[in-house]
Amino acid sequence: MSTQTASSSSSSSSLKYDVFLSFCRVDTFKNFTDHLYIALRQKGIITFRDDDDEILEQGKYISSQLLKAIEESKYAIIVLSTNYASSRWCLIELAKIVECMKVTGLIVLPVFYHVDPSHVRNQTGTVAEAFAKHEKDPKINIKDVQAWKDALKEVGNISGWHVNDSHESSDIQQILKRIFSELNFKFSSIFPKGLVGMDSRVKEVLDSYLDEGSGGVCFVGICGMGGMGKTTLAQEIYRRIFVNFEASSFIDNVREETRNRGLVSLQKQLISKILMECETNIWTKSDGIEVIGNMVRNKKVLIILDDVDGEEQLEALAGNHDWFGSGSRIIVTSRDSHLLRRFDMNFIYTVKQLNNDDALKLFSWRAFKKPDPKENYVDLSQDFVNYANGLPLALKVLCSLLFDKEIDEWNSALDKLKVEPDKNFLDILKISYDGLTNAQKELFLDIACFFKGENKDCIKDILKSFGYYPDYNIGVLIDKSLITIEQAETIWMHDLLQEMGQEIVSQESPKELGRRRRLLHYEDILFVLKNNIGTEVVEGIKLNTPIEIEEHLSVEAFSKMTNLRFLKIGYVQPPLDLIRGPIQLPQGLNYLSNELRVIDWHGYPLKSLPTSFQRNKLVELRMHCSDIKQLWKGIMILNELKLIDLSDSQNLIETPNLSGAPNLKQLILRRCTRLYKIHASLRDHKRLILLDVSKCKRLSKLCLSGTAILHQPSSVVHLKNLKMLSISGCVGLSSNKLMRFTLMQPRRSPDPMGMLVRSLIGLCFLTTLDLSYCNVQTIPNVLGCLSSLKRLNLRGNNFVEFIDAIMCTSLETLSLRVESDFGQKFHLLNCDKLIKNQGYGDLVSTMLGPYIINTQGQQDGYFVTIPGSEIPKWFSHQNVGVQ
């Protein structure tokens, strides 16, 4: 719809005209009626006005075409002026109008133009004089005169507008509002299919952003992906409110028109619609800016610029707020939200996809011309609606293909879509993609093929290694309405945009699969791998098998893919008890690309990676359920490596030397049941934030000293054989960045020490615990449950509460810095071995300072319990009795 919206409603019915104008030529043809006629036409209201001078010459009969026009009109506006009743041609029109009012329902709207409405009703004054002359005219039948009188009296009793000394422009605006609002309502009821899901959107924009009661100038942006209904929304808003403005203009397809005809042409179009002038002397863009800025400055206007994609378009057509009069509203639709933000929009409304109910209703209206699908087509209709995924453009295109087709053709069309998407809407969706830089295009294609549904932050390191500058370019894709960031920072895109991206990849080499840069379809990948037809062009492979299968590949399967940078092999939904992966290599594997940044291979079937494989560019290594026994020997320089995940790898016995991977952030080894040793180099990893060794039952020693770990080792409680746990200097454990206790039971907590307590519960064989320099403020009560604990290092912490080591009968040494400040209680009940160690006497005495301890253990709120009946001699400050 455009400015001719109301006209469209007329053509859909048997009525040809919206309005028939009846007037006396000598009174109003060159003033009021002319202004009214132009205003009606400007608003897109089809109006009949008799412009034939000869038709009303004396002695001529009124044209039959003119009378027919009355029959074919919805409204008749009768301008009752001073000489109206003197013209028998006007009175003939009037009689026909009243006849149609009774027979066809023609709506009559009288305008009393400089005449007294009571004279018309009562036929007095000049009206009476006019009829007296008609009665004396021998050419006029007296019965006709009576019919005219009756018609005029009936019209005189209809409520209308009295135009006398008021501003004619205001009266014309009132007439326009009345007609347009009624035409608008009728149009909506005739064409509900065009408004499915639109009413709520229009109401939200009008109520929230386009309040006409507020003064000033308001710029509103409407953004969203291609085909989402931005233009339709803008058209509907325009249709509903343009009558309230002095002038209005809807400029379609700004992006395309700028390329085809240039900005000057659009400026001329805007000015001609606003000023109602056919010719404008504009030759350059700067001329247009000057004219628009000067000529529209004092007008209350509504301007809609549809499908804008460049800042120069806005600068040439909408400039700034100062260009327009108070109350003006400028609406801009665009796929680029960043463009709208840069241009200082007052508000930006993002169009969302249709919900399923509205999508099905819209589909049904277009496919069946009714609100619900035909019987036997219900399930198929839902299949097509699911495919469109709430995108109105897709629904429209699909319905144009399916309308009036048999059910077999519907089934065939659905099967075809699964193999080959429809080019009509993919071409429209591709417009935003075409405007990207090369790096942004590559990022979009990688997301469409590999990373849709992934956490944005989790894949940032990978995207950086690809050279995509994700912090900036992901924002660009969001601004271009190509992707969104959903809950939990998940990267998402519409299914059809994903399909478009994958189609772009397929079209790189339609025939030779091995020459596509990205391989992602199950059958295609297996065909390439099993036939060894991959080439140096291939950069990424994502093999997700839908079922539990085993495919056997040759040793040379990856030998030609020298530029492979992404490799993912696994199941769509692997069974919980799955051990083996989908790919088997009975003869081994002799080559993997040295360009690989990501290896994610579920069920990797070999005990090691190929010896020729240089891992120096590797960022992530994920091998769940693998047969890996050893990752590498000695020290490897792996500066890019951020993550190792070998969960459920039952053959893994120990981790390699990790000193060559200084940037390692995550080491995930859960359920590696044969793992008994983590290499000591782990303690030097200052960037390690996550270590997961849950259910590594044979692991007996774990040292995290000096790491920056922010996540407590998952489910340490399962490490029943653990004898030594050192987290010295792990300041992250007591920071507010601590996110979760176990990967199996994630939670956010402000109590990191509480998580440490839960970690230690059940470690009945633990003999050594090093918590030095961990910023610990409270000694956990759980120490009393560590029945085998012999050595506890708490050096370098800032305690504010107490030590409770009651019943720690095996505790022999307690390392504390002398200047430690204990604010409340110190419990050493039944710690016989510790108390008897005289070397700690001065230490404890120093900690307690000048405070006096009695044998009952009470002193100013401090509580120390020691065995025996008297204070040991090594207390330097003693006193018997109560002070």
Image (spheres, helix red, strand yellow):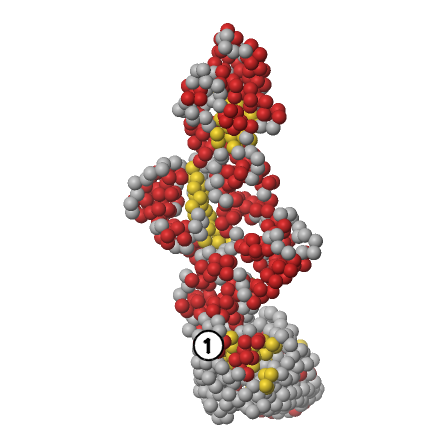
Query: Residue at (29%, 47%) from the top-left corner?
Result: 284
- The correct choice, above or below, for 660 with respect to 89 in the image is below
- Residue 342: image quadrant is bottom left
| Residue in front for this viewpoint, 430 or 658 | 430
- Disc tally is 1
Would you say 181 lies left or right of 59 here? Answer: right
Query: Residue at (67%, 56%) from the top-left corner?
Result: 377
Q: Is residue 292 visible?
A: yes
Q: Residue furthest top?
A: 136
Which residue was labeled with disc 1?
515
Label 1 secondary element: helix
| Residue in front for this viewpoint, 662 or 332 | 332
- The correct choice, above or below, for 673 with respect to 278 in the image is below
- Alpha-carbon neighbours of circle 1 within 10 Å: few (<14), some, or many (≥20)? many
Q: How far across and down, in percent of the image, does residue 593 sit?
A: 46, 84
- The correct choice, above or below, for 427 with respect to 533 in the image is above
Q: How far across and down, in percent of the image, does residue 745 sit?
A: 65, 73
| Residue in front for this viewpoint, 234 or 256 | 256
Q: Quadrant of the C terminus?
A: bottom right
Would you say 31 lies left or right of 9 here? Answer: left
Query: Residue at (50%, 58%) from the top-left corner?
Result: 424
Q: How far across and down, in percent of the image, does residue 882 sit?
A: 66, 77
Q: How far across and down, in percent of the image, does residue 616 sit?
A: 44, 84
| Residue in front for this viewpoint, 763 or 5 | 5
Query: Residue at (56%, 25%) from the top-left corner?
Result: 108
Q: Is residue 693 visible?
A: no
Q: Amino acid at mark 1?
A: Arg
Would you say 11 lies left or right of 316 here? Answer: right
